[in-house]
Amino acid sequence: MFDFKREKQALDQQQLALTHDGLTQAIHQGVDRRRFLLGLGGLSAAALLPMPALASRSAPVRKLSLHSINTGEQVTASFWEEGRYLKEGLNTLNRVMRDYRAGEQSEIDPKLFDQLYLLQHRLGKAGEIQVISGYRSPNTNAMLRRRSRGVAKKSYHMTGQAIDLRIPGVSLAQVRQAALNMKVGGVGYYPSSNFVHLDTGPVRSWV
């Protein structure tokens, strides 16, 4: 007999135990609670399958929609499919994440895109992510540091490992809480500037 409560608890524990090393595996195994719960609707034949079997049926594609509020660019790209990252999709996302002030583009850590993908699924929101800041050149970061004490000298933005973002239709507090629940990377909360910071560094948080 299918034990709904036990499977739900197991899924919650899997999500809360995420680390960078296990992020890709967790997504691939179907760590999408919203789809999981909806899929249990009528206790169909599929609901009687064990979790590994259900997971193997999930579509192995990861896609993001990014909107740079600074340049107005909007893109949607698949960046991972069938067990590998897609170079073309990554390049498309990298361009939107470029340092628009300096006109410089850099490779963004693919794990950051994995985090964004998982964050949207945790929120049940598949629309666009607004990019306030992605990659920053050292010169741009130094300039911003002169303007604000909130900019780190060795910012993860300079290594393509960070993003400042908003998600339309979702409050900053909700975005922050969902990011904290993933227990992956850094989470910064900047309500006065209207964005949440995510990075692929060590697990930590600040306000």
Image (tube, rainbow, N blue to C red):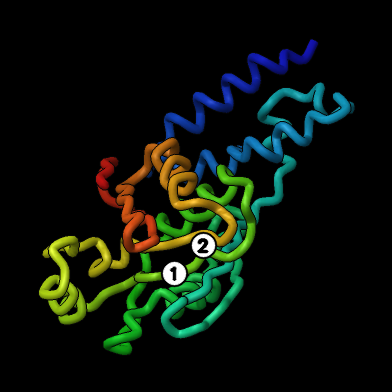
Residues 55 and 32: in front is 32
Q: Position of residue 24 (x, y in %)?
A: 49, 46
Q: Is the residue 154 above or below the residue 93 in the image? A: above
| C-alpha separation, residue under disc 2 versus residue under disc 1 | 21 Å
Q: Position of residue 25 (x, y in %)?
A: 51, 41
Q: Is residue 71 left or right of residue 46?
A: left
**Residue beneath the point at 57% across and 64% down:** 64
Q: Nearer the viewer, mark 2 or mark 1?
A: 1
Q: Position of residue 206 (x, y in %)?
A: 25, 45
Q: Secondary structure at mark 1?
A: strand
Please give the residue where the numbered disc 2 appears in the rendered image: 85
Disc 2 marks a residue whose amino acid type is Tyr
Q: Is residue 98 left or right of residue 43?
A: left
**Residue beneath the point at 52% across and 59% down:** 167
Q: 10 Å neighbourhood of mark 2: few (<14), some, or many (≥20)?
A: some
Q: Which mark is residue 103?
A: none
- Which quadrant of the figure has residue 180? top left
Tell me how many marks there are. Answer: 2
**Residue beneath the point at 72% across and 13% down:** 3
The first of marks 2 and 1 along the sequence is 2
**Residue beneath the point at 56% across and 43% down:** 122
Q: 10 Å neighbourhood of mark 1: few (<14), some, or many (≥20)?
A: many
